[in-house]
Image (spheres, grey):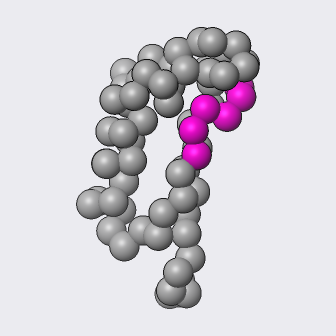
Amino acid sequence: RTRPEGVKDGFEWYCQKCHSLLHRVEVQLRSIVKDLPPLFEQFYASKALRTCAECGAVHPGKE
């Protein structure tokens, strides 16, 4: 089945301590191999994106 043009996929990261949403990004994927790594790299590289606004815990990033 072919996906309709313009459909976006959402990716979410959650706090490991309190399970609150840390970061969400929506993108129209054209290639999983090419499009996903930059999204993960952006999250892992940013302490601000990995810091929970609810409890202050910092996601450990790439393990």
User: Relative to residue 52, is residue 26 depicted above or below?
Assistant: below
- Where is residue 49 drawn, in percent x and y? 50, 30
- Where is residue 9 drawn, in percent x and y? 55, 63
Count of marks placed on residues: 0
Q: In which quarter of the image is the C terminus?
A: top left
Q: Which region shows up in magenta?
A: 19-24
Write down the quadrant of residue 18 in the picture. Answer: top right
Q: Specify whether residue 21 is painted magenta.
A: yes
From the viewer's side, name the closer residue of 51 and 12.
51
User: Relative to residue 1, is residue 32 depicted above or below?
Assistant: above
Task: Kindly identify the residue that appears in the image at 63 percent across and 12 percent down.
Answer: 56
Task: Kindly identify the residue that appears in the image at 39 percent across and 28 percent down.
Answer: 46
Q: Specify whether residue 11 is painted magenta.
A: no
- Where is residue 3 drawn, in percent x and y? 53, 83
- Where is residue 5 drawn, in percent x and y? 50, 86
Task: Kindly identify the residue that appears in the image at 31 percent across and 48 percent down.
Answer: 37
User: Relative to residue 52, is residue 5 depicted above or below?
Assistant: below
User: Relative to residue 51, is residue 24 depicted above or below?
Assistant: below
Task: Kindly identify the residue that appears in the image at 67 percent across and 34 percent down.
Answer: 21
Main secondary structure along the magenta-highlighted residues: strand
